[in-house]
């Protein structure tokens, strides 16, 4: 049997320098919590954070939130399409693989992947856009990273000693820096999150694991639903075509569905492998050996190679045109927009409809933000019910 060391890192030449990983030692500044807690006898701070996230109500609600689509227009919800929850679990699997293979902190990567979509409102991207539009009328905006931070620092109430989950600094910083960099001037409230520096690689990699997970999953769900045809995917996504041809050579009699799965599996593997190679090459080119080198680098270092990035970007463009914004999906988006806008208006007009714990937020947060916070937490099914109970149609 392989030794544990060999299992974790099959080839030490693929590791990054050990000083680049975030230290999970309880005394590490990244493990700092707003409310100091004694170290656990056998769990690291980031493993505890991953568990805290997993046990929240907000995490469980991801099961009832749309990722891209959960049903075809006119159909009841399908059981096999990705939800935000299954997408999150796929991102977590990819992130753990990346972090382990690069000798980064896999427990931190896992915690960040589990939390990365926790701030998303119902109805996927259409829901987020509609909520943002509703808030714009009040001089505010909706940002799912900042909402995620509020969930873990305030809305989740599970501990008698503090509000929120009391997560470590590294996890809170990773939440704030998921896929974007905020300016310190525009966001003085985020000052403790080192806005002048890039996040550690563990956090940077989540953005790419997210892209890789949904690119391959959306091709899969698109084919499965019949919205995308095999021919158009082969035509529009050259990497898929290459792996699909190779699969047909290896398994000439494979059922079409299995050949497509195999091509997608190889595509996912190629993206992850390219990302690891590209990160290692960038770290080596920079001569980075410490976490601080990564944080002060001229750019984020976690990115695909330029060739693979071009292929990914063109595949994503195809998904926008043929899946995300396809005619049937537009009807679902219009419905999502209508439900969110109308419910927002109902709640603004009658704040008595808000649960009492949300009403208590009005004096500090203002009514519009409070209404948006309530809506953002809802599942697709819950918002539909409340909307029709309020007279929405
Ligand atoms: Mg995501």
Image: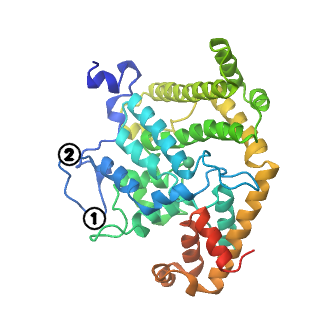
Q: How is the image coloured?
A: rainbow
Position of the C terminus by quadrant: bottom right
Residue 367: % across, % down: 57, 81
Q: Which residue is mark 1?
A: 35
Quadrant where the N terminus sits is top left
Q: Earlier in the sequence, mark 1 or mark 2?
A: 1
In depth, the one of 241 and 132 nearer the eye is 241
Query: Residue 37, percent across and down?
Result: 22, 60
Which residue is at a point 61% across and 39% down the rendered structure image?
217
* Along the viewing direction, whichever of 318 and 291 lies nearer the viewer: 318
- Residue 208 versus residue 241 in the image, above or below: below
For residue 142, what is the image quadrant? bottom right
Q: Is residue 19 shown left or right of residue 207?
A: left
Secondary structure found at label 1: loop
Image point (79%, 31%), residue name: 232
Residue 138 visible in image: no
Viewer-proximal residue among 289 and 220? 220
User: Which of pointers 1 and 2 indicates the residue nearer the eye?
Assistant: 2
Q: Residues within 10 Å of mark 2 (few under 14, many from 20)?
A: few
Q: Which residue is mark 2?
A: 42
Classify mark 1 as within 8 Å of ligand 1 or not, answering yes or no.
no
Tell me if the residue at label 2 has its CB under 8 Å from ligand 1: no
Figure check: 376 above or below 247: below
- Proximity of marks 1 and 2: CB atoms separated by less than 8 Å: no
Image x and y of residue 89, in percent? 48, 44
Local secondary structure at mark 2: loop
Across and down, in percent, residue 112 comes to 43, 48
State whether residue 179 is above or below residue 239. Answer: below
| Residue at 46% over, 42% down | 92
Residue at 52% from the left image edge and 63% from the top image edge: 147
């Amino acid at each position: 049997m392989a030794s544990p060391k060999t299992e974790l890192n099959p080839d030490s030449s693929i590791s990054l320098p050990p000083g680049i990983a975030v230290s999970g030692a309880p005394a590490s500044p990244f493990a700092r919590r707003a409310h100091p807690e004694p170290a656990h006898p056998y769990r690291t701070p980031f493993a505890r954070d991953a568990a805290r996230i997993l046990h929240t109500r907000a995490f469980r609600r991801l099961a009832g939130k749309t990722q891209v689509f959960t049903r075809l227009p006119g159909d009841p919800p399908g059981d096999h399409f990705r939800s935000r929850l299954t997408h999150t679990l796929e991102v977590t699997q990819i992130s753990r693989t990346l972090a382990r293979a690069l000798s980064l902190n896999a427990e931190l990567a896992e915690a960040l992947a589990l939390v990365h979509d926790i701030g998303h409102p119902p109805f996927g991207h259409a829901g987020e856009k509609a909520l943002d539009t509703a808030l714009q009328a009040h001089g505010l905006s909706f940002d799912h990273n900042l909402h995620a931070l509020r969930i873990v620092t305030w809305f989740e109430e599970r501990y008698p000693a503090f509000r929120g989950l009391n997560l470590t600094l590294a996890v809170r910083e990773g939440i704030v820096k998921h896929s974007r960099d905020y300016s310190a001037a525009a966001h003085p409230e985020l000052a403790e999150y080192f806005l002048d520096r890039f996040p550690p690689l563990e956090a940077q990699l989540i953005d790419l694991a997210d892209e890789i997970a949904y690119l391959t999953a959306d091709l899969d769900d698109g084919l499965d639903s019949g919205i995308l045809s095999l021919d158009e995917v082969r035509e529009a996504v050259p990497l898929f075509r290459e792996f699909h041809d190779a699969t047909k050579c290896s398994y000439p009699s494979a059922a079409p569905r299995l050949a497509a799965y195999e091509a997608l599996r190889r595509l996912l593997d190629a993206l992850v492998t390219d990302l690891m190679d590209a990160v290692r090459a960038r770290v080596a080119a920079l001569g980075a050996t410490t976490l601080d080198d990564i944080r002060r680098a001229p750019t984020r270092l976690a990115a695909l190679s330029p060739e693979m990035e071009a292929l990914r970007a063109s595949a994503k463009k195809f998904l926008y045109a043929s899946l995300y914004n396809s005619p049937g999906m537009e009807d679902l988006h219009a419905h999502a927009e209508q439900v969110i806008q109308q419910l927002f208006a109902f709640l603004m007009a009658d704040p008595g409809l808000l649960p009492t714990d949300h009403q208590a937020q009005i004096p500090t947060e203002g009514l519009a933000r409070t209404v948006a916070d309530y809506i953002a937490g809802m599942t697709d099914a819950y918002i539909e019910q409340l909307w029709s109970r309020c007279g929405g149609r």
